[in-house]
Image (cartoon, coloured by chain):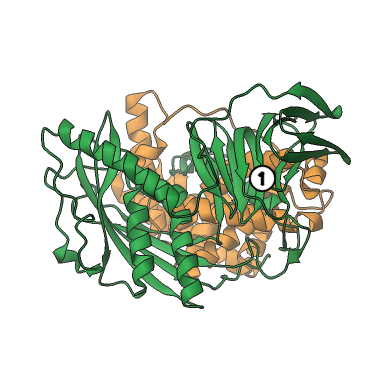
């Protein structure tokens, strides 16, 4: 994998958002650059890797840019949460249309570590996670990705998946349980830590 | 789950492979967004607006899938669904590259230049591009630092800096005809031999044009069929060199000898030589960037003959190549599984595919590809949330 510049962190500032609303080309580009890694990561983990991820990412950003004038920067939702909610819906819509199949990412695309032993372990772990996650239902996988990798609260997951909060909690619980069961036989170190606690949802 | 568990959970799940954004993605999205207004209405260069489509006047859907035949050593199979309108494209040049853009323009992009277009609505977000435009209605190239409007001429647009809108600058030189460069409400009219610059300080003349016209530019605007013919000559030269690199004389070209319009997969012979390997994504990217615009042209012409035409064309083609020379399409056939039976469109698709170049198969040899493409005049829904 070729070296890439460090991704920008944090939320985009309000001034740039306002310029993106006004279709300023540089601001539009800055908006995409700021969030493209998160969107690609979320989409590829929910629907599987491949060229279709770029199509879905483009659809996500275009939907978001159309709706950007109605986004309230001073509101409760962060831009990233709002954008990843759109991405989740785009991904689940694509899956419902059977437009894409969940295929774990080719390991050659994610090799960016220089320590061969650590890299090997990481690949093994990555393969195991991806294969186990591919067996989840779409909603369960989306809940897992949003909760564990994008820091969504249960209420935000429920909103992204258009389901009640208790249902979101159940799906996340089942996703974690499935991951623990699938990873445990592989003797991957600290598999339990990957899947979180096993408290039944109330 | 306690806080330590949560921290470890997220840390370990980060090993879950994630796909990286493709180079130039942000520029492509920004270009696509510029062609829309926030209501999903695409504006035309003459100020009219069309509602109900987001990408052009004659909405077209293409769904394309690729299935790689047994010759592919990886056996990769995947499918994608794309949405494209007639005359729409998005190109970042990796070297000097000539393109037909929209219905009236030929562009020569220098390395790094980025152009997106839908019909005759053009956005140049970066780099150096020479433009030749057919005479006709107003034609405009939008840049981060102003708009260049013409009615039929040759001119060069160089976007100098585009990291921020305030820092962006555009330099325009005119070779033929007249051009209007507009920035911030101010306009400078330029005649042949004149140049101007637009940046945060406004728009102003800068003197005479000094750059030469690229030699790759054709003498006159070209019709759709002309470029494939020129590409075919290049392809034929490369083909001869590739087969010589194999130590063989080029076999008789099947496409030149004619043949049935539709073939069963079993009737399509592999080229002589060994089966090689080509990354599926390399093929997909090249087909999407270079072949789809030509395929849309073929479909557009066929739809004029048969309004509402829709259906599938299944292409079967073989790529042969050498690492030092590159890869060309050795043969292209339309399989019997196709549902579109327009003979001229079939010829157009085959000719267009034969003009394509690809990365060479690794370690040389050939790769065969089966590529179904769905055509329909319908725009899929794409409502916003």
Residue bearing the label numbered 1? B123
Q: Nearer the viewer, residue B297 or A107?
A: B297
> Which quarter of the rendering shows the C terminus of chain B?
bottom right
Q: Secondary structure at mark 1?
A: strand
Q: Nearer the viewer, residue A61 or A82?
A: A61
Image spot of residue B349 (x, y percent): 36, 60
In the displayed structure, B48 sits above or below A17; it is below
Crowding at dot 1, Cα within 10 Å, few <14 / some 14-19 / many 20+, comes out as many
Whether residue B70 is visible to the viewer of this picture, yes or no, is: yes
Residue at 37% across / 28% down in the picture? A118
In the displayed structure, B219 sits above or below B384; it is above
Q: Which chain comes out orange in the rendered image? A: A
When asked about the image quadrant of residue A166, the answer is: bottom right
Image spot of residue A78 (x, y percent): 74, 48
Q: Nearer the viewer, residue B139 or B127?
A: B139
Q: Is residue A20 left or right of residue B105?
A: right
Subunit that carries the residue with mark 1: B
In the displayed structure, A164 sits above or below B12; it is below
Image spot of residue A109 (x, y percent): 39, 39
Image spot of residue A75 (x, y percent): 82, 52
Whether residue A11 is visible to the viewer of this picture, yes or no, is: no
Residue at 49% across / 58% down in the picture? A141
Residue at 41% across / 37% down in the picture? A110
**Chain B shown in which color?**
green
């Amino acid at each position: 994998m070729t070296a890439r510049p460090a991704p920008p962190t944090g939320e985009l500032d309000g001034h740039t958002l306002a310029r993106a609303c006004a279709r300023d080309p540089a601001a539009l580009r800055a908006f995409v650059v700021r969030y493209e890694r998160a969107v690609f990561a979320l989409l590829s983990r929910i629907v599987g890797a491949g060229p279709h991820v770029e199509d879905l990412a483009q659809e996500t950003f275009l939907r978001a840019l159309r709706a950007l004038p109605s986004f309230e920067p001073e509101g409760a939702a962060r831009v990233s949460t709002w954008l990843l909610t759109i991405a989740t819906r785009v991904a689940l819509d694509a899956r419902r249309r059977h437009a894409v199949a969940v295929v774990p990412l080719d390991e050659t695309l994610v090799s960016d570590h220089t320590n061969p032993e650590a890299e090997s372990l990481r690949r093994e772990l990555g393969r195991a996670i991806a294969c186990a996650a591919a067996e989840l239902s779409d909603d369960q996988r989306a809940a897992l990705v949003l909760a564990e990798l994008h820091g969504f609260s249960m209420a935000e997951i429920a909103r992204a998946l258009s389901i009640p909060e208790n249902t979101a909690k159940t799906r996340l619980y089942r996703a974690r349980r499935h991951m623990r069961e699938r990873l445990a036989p592989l003797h991957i170190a600290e598999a339990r830590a990957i899947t979180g606690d096993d408290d039944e949802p109330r | 789950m306690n806080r330590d568990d949560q921290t470890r959970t997220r840390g370990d799940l980060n090993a879950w492979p994630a796909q990286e954004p493709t180079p130039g993605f942000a520029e492509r999205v920004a270009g696509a967004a510029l062609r829309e207004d926030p209501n999903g209405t695409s504006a035309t260069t003459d100020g009219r607006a069309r509602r109900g489509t987001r990408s052009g006047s004659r909405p077209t859907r293409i769904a394309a899938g690729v299935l790689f035949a047994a010759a592919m050593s990886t056996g990769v199979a995947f499918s994608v669904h794309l949405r494209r309108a007639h005359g729409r494209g998005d190109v970042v040049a990796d070297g000097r590259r000539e393109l037909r853009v929209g219905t009236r323009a030929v562009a020569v992009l220098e390395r790094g230049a980025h152009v997106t277009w839908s019909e005759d609505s053009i956005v140049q977000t970066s780099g150096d591009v020479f433009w030749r435009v057919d005479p006709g209605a107003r034609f405009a190239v939008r840049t981060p630092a102003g708009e260049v409007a013409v009615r039929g001429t040759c001119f060069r647009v160089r976007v100098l800096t585009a990291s921020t809108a305030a820092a962006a600058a555009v330099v325009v030189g005119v070779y033929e005809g007249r051009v209007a460069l507009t920035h911030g409400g101010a306009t400078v009219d330029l005649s042949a031999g004149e140049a101007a610059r637009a940046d945060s300080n406004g728009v102003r003349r800068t003197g005479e044009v000094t750059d030469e016209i690229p030699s790759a530019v054709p003498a006159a605007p070209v019709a759709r069929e002309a470029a494939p013919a020129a590409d075919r000559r290049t392809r034929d030269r490369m083909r001869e060199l590739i087969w010589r690199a194999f130590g063989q004389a080029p076999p008789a070209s099947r496409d030149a000898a004619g043949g049935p319009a539709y073939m069963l997969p079993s009737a399509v012979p592999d080229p002589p030589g060994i089966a090689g390997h080509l990354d599926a994504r390399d093929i997909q990217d090249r087909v999407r960037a270079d072949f789809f615009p030509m395929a849309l042209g073929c479909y557009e012409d066929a739809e004029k003959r048969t309004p509402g035409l829709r259906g599938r064309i299944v292409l079967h083609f073989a790529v042969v190549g050498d690492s030092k020379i590159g890869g060309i399409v050795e043969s292209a056939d339309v399989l019997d599984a196709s549902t579109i039976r327009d003979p001229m469109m079939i010829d157009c698709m085959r000719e267009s595919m034969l003009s394509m170049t690809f990365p060479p198969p690794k370690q040389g040899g050939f790769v065969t590809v089966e590529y179904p493409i769905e055509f329909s005049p319908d725009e899929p829904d794409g409502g916003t949330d």
